[in-house]
Image (cartoon, rainbow, N blue to C red):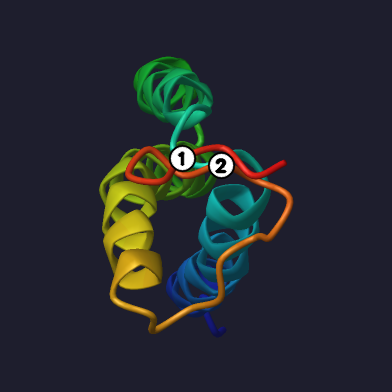
Amino acid sequence: MLHIEGLLLGLSTFLVIGIFHPVVIKTEYYFGTRPWWIFLLIGLGGAIAALFISSLFWSALCGIVGFSSLWTIKELFEQEERVKKGWFPKNPKRTYPDETPKD
C-alpha cells in the first residue's frame, strides 16, 4: 500500500509557494506594503491552527500556509525595493513614499 501524504504535502508546499509569489507582486503593485499585517494574521492563524489540528496532514498544511504567509511579509518589503530598483513596474496610479504626489 502506498502512503501518498508526503507526496501530497510536497505538492501542496509547491502550490502554496507558487500562489504566494504572484500575491506578493500584485499586493505591492496595488497596495504597497500597507497590508503586511493581513499576512501576519494569516500566518499566526495558520501556525496556531496547526497546534490544534489532530490530523498530521492538515496540521502540516496549516503550518506550511502559515509560515509561507509570514515569509510573504519579508518578500512584500523586498518587492518594494525591487520596484525602486526598476526590476518590476511601478503602479502609475500610486504615490510611492520617496516621490511627490502626481497631479
Which quarter of the rendered picture does the N terminus lie within? bottom right
Does dot 1 land on a helix, a strand or a loop? loop
Can I make out residue 39 in this image?
Answer: no
Residue at figure coordinates x 54%, y 78% from the top left:
11
Residue, disc 1: 100
Tell me: residue 49, above or below residue 21: above
Choose between 13 and 77: the one closer to the eye.
Answer: 77
Looking at numbered disc 1 in the image, what kind of residue is underneath it?
Answer: Thr
Residue, disc 2: 95
Image mark count: 2
Residue at figure coordinates x 52%, y 57% from the top left:
24
Can I make out residue 83 in this image?
Answer: yes
Residue 92 x/y as whole percent = 69, 60
Does dot 2 land on a helix, a strand or a loop? loop
Tell me: residue 66, above or below residue 17: above
Which quarter of the rendered picture does the C terminus lie within? top right
- Give the mark toward the camera: 1 or 2: 1
Specify the quadrant of the image occupied by residue 70.
top left
Q: Is residue 73 left or right of residue 89?
A: left
Circle 1/circle 2 CB separation < 8 Å:
yes
Residue 73 x/y as whole percent = 34, 41
Looking at numbered disc 2 in the image, what kind of residue is underneath it?
Answer: Thr
